[in-house]
Image (cartoon, rainbow, N blue to C red):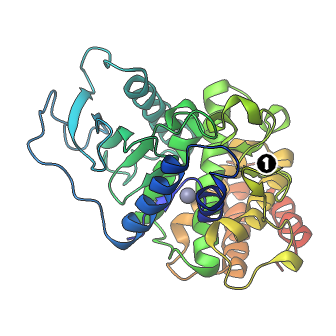
Amino acid sequence: MSVCFFVPAHIVEHLARNARRLGLDADAARRTALASHALRRTRQATATGLEALTPARPGEGDRQIFDDDHRWATGVKQVRGEDDIPAPTTAAGAAFDALGVTRAFLREVLGRDSIDDAGMPLLADVNYGAKYGNAFWDGTRTVFGNGDDTVFRDFTADVGVCGHEVAHGLTQHTAGLDYTGQPGALNEAFSDIVAACVEQFAHRTDAGEHHWLIGEGVLADQWRGEAIRSMARPGAAYDNPVLGRDPQGAHMSAYVPGGAPHVNSGIVNRVFHLCATTLGSFPAVRIFYAALCDLWPRARFLDFAYVVSEQARLLARDGRVPRGAPHTVRSAFREVGIH
Ligand SMILES: [Zn+2]
């Protein structure tokens, strides 16, 4: 099982390389990069001796929030369970609320009972590491860093981050997509798709009003208007000396062979944006979710296009998505060169 990070390696490494020259907290940038390498190599040890408050009830999708107290370990101290009084810190409260919105989205929009569709408890850690500039899914839980407040703010500040990481769990429990090549890009794209839809669910908006940016809420104030990815315009999310330049392509002609999942996922993100702006975000995500449940670990873009089209046809036949869905989906894939 791979550890799936929110901020891609190309940004993390750019920051670590250029921190001093750019006047950033160089130690924080270097520690974030080192922690990412370590996490990739080995699953983080979970601290023992948990101080359990309300224990999670199996099968109820209960939330449990842990405060890692700025250590580089997860599960350090449980600070809030499903029925406990409000969490003691802002980050713990924000993580608890974000998990709640994500759980409600899964249930109400996708008809899914938590990550495994069997009420798996939802775990999250806050205050992980020291000024850690990232968030990740480690195979069992979502982990949020605080950021350094210059480049990134606390990663619980954007409900989309929680949606994105929980969706990695959902992919793990359905298609089980690999985390390299085209399956890896599909894995990342599905997490961004869920992130965008959870944000719209939380704000009661739809495709036409949504900004289609990913991670805009975790960038510090000076980067207003920029984001980590743009689903509507892959490659246009950011361009500045601190973060570098967004390397995503928006069409198969810009596909990077051997590129990291976060690079080639933009092409699939754009397919979803095209579908959502025609069908509405929630009908579109129902189709993509149904397709995910039919995919397999090494599925490629063309496989995905086929399965999405099939699901659009079946769901439209049953009146669960607009009648034009199969046509919309086919033209969206064609538009980005997947056909
Ligand atoms: Zn991801």
Residue 152 quadrant: top right
198 w.r.t. 308: above or below: above
| 237 sits to left or right of 47 | right
For label 1, being within 8 Å of ligand 1 is answered: no
Q: In the rendered image, which quarter contains the N terminus? A: bottom left
Instruction: Residue 304 in the image: state x and y as whole percent.
Output: 67, 74
| 265 sits to left or right of 299 | right
Q: Which residue is mark 1?
A: 276
Ligand 1's quadrant is: bottom right
Instruction: Residue 309 in the image: state x and y as whole percent.
Output: 74, 69
> What crowding class fits label 1: few (fewer than 14 Cα within 10 Å), some (14-19), or many (20 or more)?
many
Q: Residue at x 76, y 57 (%)?
A: 244
Q: Residue at x 57, y 66 (%)?
A: 187
Q: Which three-letter amino acid code belongs to the residue tagged 1?
A: Ala
The furthest residue to the top: 85
Q: Nearer the viewer, residue 322 or 253?
A: 253
335 w.r.t. 272: above or below: below
Q: Residue at x 77, y 43 (%)?
A: 212
Q: Nearer the viewer, residue 259 or 326?
A: 259
Residue 246 quadrant: bottom right
The furthest residue to the left: 49
Instruction: Residue 296 in the image: state x and y as whole percent.
Output: 51, 78
Q: Tell me, yes or no, if residue 191 can be seen here.
A: yes
Residue 291 quadrant: bottom right
Instruction: Residue 91 in the image: state x and y as whole percent.
Output: 42, 27
Q: Secondary structure at mark 1?
A: helix
